[in-house]
Image (cartoon, coloured by chain):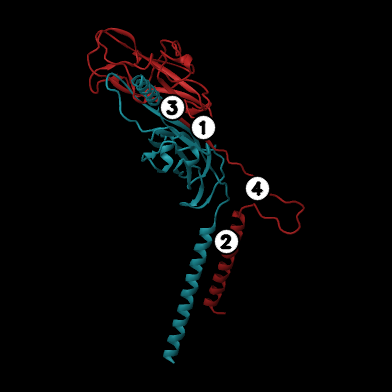
Chain colours: A cyan, B red
Amino acid sequence: MKKRVYIAVLICLLIVGLSQSALARKGVGIVWNTETEIVNEGASHCISYGVYNPWDEDVAATLTASEELKPIIVKEDTEPKFIKAETYHEQAIPIEFCFKVARVYARNCLVGGMLCEQTCTEPQVEYSGNILALEEQTGGTTGTGSATSLGVSVPLKIKVACNAHPRNYTPAYIAIIIIALLLIAWILYKKQKGNANKQELQ
Amino acid sequence: MQKESLLLIILVGVIIFSLYGLTHQAVQFEDSNQQVTGYQAFVETDSRVQIQAFVAIAKSANLSAGINFGAIAVLPISQANGTGNYNPTNISGPISNFGNVTEYNITVSTDSNSAVDFCIRANAPLSIPGADEIGLGNYTWQNSTIANSSEPLKFGKRITTSFQDDTKSISPGGSNHYRFWLNVSASQAPGTYNNTIHFKAIPLSGIC
């Protein structure tokens, strides 16, 4: 009788174990707070995302930007992040992306890059792409078949702001002030030297 | 009046003019958002809301282990099943699903606040690196939000190297179930052929 009970318990444990292994899941999640950002031209801007794993197995995940966004990325953490099982979205691991947009709108400058005005008559420039949270691929098939990879992709649009402004004469005024001060100093120096020579002659 | 003194007066005048120009320029560039001072008949306050979105998905254990077509001994073969397509011992899910249910699925976590669409693609044809390959036209798949012996239905769509629309609007807690099939011609060279299948979830109304 006891033997039968032991066998029944063993079978139950085996079934529970098998079903648990069949239910074991591995995945990745992403937390995002924005899908559109406005960035000033020539300025840097950082956006924070989070990766998490509410499932029952540890996972390594990376966050990458799509090709469309690569030209303006200055900081991208592509190192895989180890995320422990049952890391919920409140405990998501933060990953920051930083973008720097070059000057994209035409400016009317009088001397080189100085004394410029900007009218902002062109259409707004924007970069559209995706940020992809990707589970690190592990293992593969033993026979003919396919390994699998899993990811969550969220859209991101970077709009470049154009700040219209009148011609900026500040550098010219500063240059004039410096030149005038130098000239004053030179005149005063010459005057003083002339007075000294006169005194020596007397 | 001496010539130097006259020049000095002119230069000081130039400096005063330039300083005026600088201040005038600064006023022109100053942000127009000036604070109101003095008597005010109203008060104002900032209003702000931060909307956060989060989505997590996971593969079933069998999908994590890969889509295996096993050892194919007899050629040609049409619609060879992925080894997880029909698992008679599947005891997960409701009792009505027991037996012959696919073990390939992706689930959207309940710790998500957005439904998602799914996309699927292959990185390349099944191949022996640097040698033979099985064209992607021979690799088919089908998906369904229902899992039983007849769902997902046979024999599906051809997989491609571009992401294809898969299932629309899977809510948190929901699952997307898959089956995969492979055709192999009589002339296919023996060997182990591999590739990678990518699954991607995107927020609703996104483009694959």
Q: Which residue is mark 1?
A: B112
| Upstream in sequence: badge 4 or badge 1 | 4
Q: Pointer 1: residues within 10 angstroms few (<14), some, or many (20+)?
A: many
* Residue B156 lies in quadrant: top left
Q: Assign a secondary structure to mark 2.
A: helix
Q: Is residue B163 visible?
A: no
Residue B134, position in %: x, y?
29, 15
Q: Which residue is mark 3?
A: B200
- Dot 3 falls on which chain? B
- The tag on residue B46 is 4
Q: Which residue is mark 2?
A: B22
Q: Pointer 4: residues within 10 angstroms few (<14), some, or many (20+)?
A: few
Q: Are marks 1 and 3 on the same chain?
A: yes
Location of the N terminus of chain B (image quadrant): bottom right
Q: Nearer the viewer, mark 1 or mark 2?
A: 1
- Dot 1 falls on which chain? B
Total numbered labels placed on residues in the image: 4
Cα distance, mark 4 to mark 3? 39 Å
* Residue A70 lies in quadrant: top left
- Dot 2 falls on which chain? B
Q: Assign a secondary structure to mark 3.
A: strand
Residue B53, position in %: x, y?
53, 35
Horizontal placement of B31 versus B196: left or right? right
**Kind of residue sitting beneath label 2:** Leu
**Kind of residue sitting beneath label 3:** Lys
The residue at 54%/74% (across/down) is B8
Cα distance, mark 2 to mark 3? 56 Å
What is the residue that sits farthest to the front in this orientation? A1
Horizontal placement of B115 versus B177: left or right? right
Cα distance, mark 4 to mark 1? 29 Å
B153 or A104, which is in the foreground? B153
B66 or A73, which is in the foreground? B66
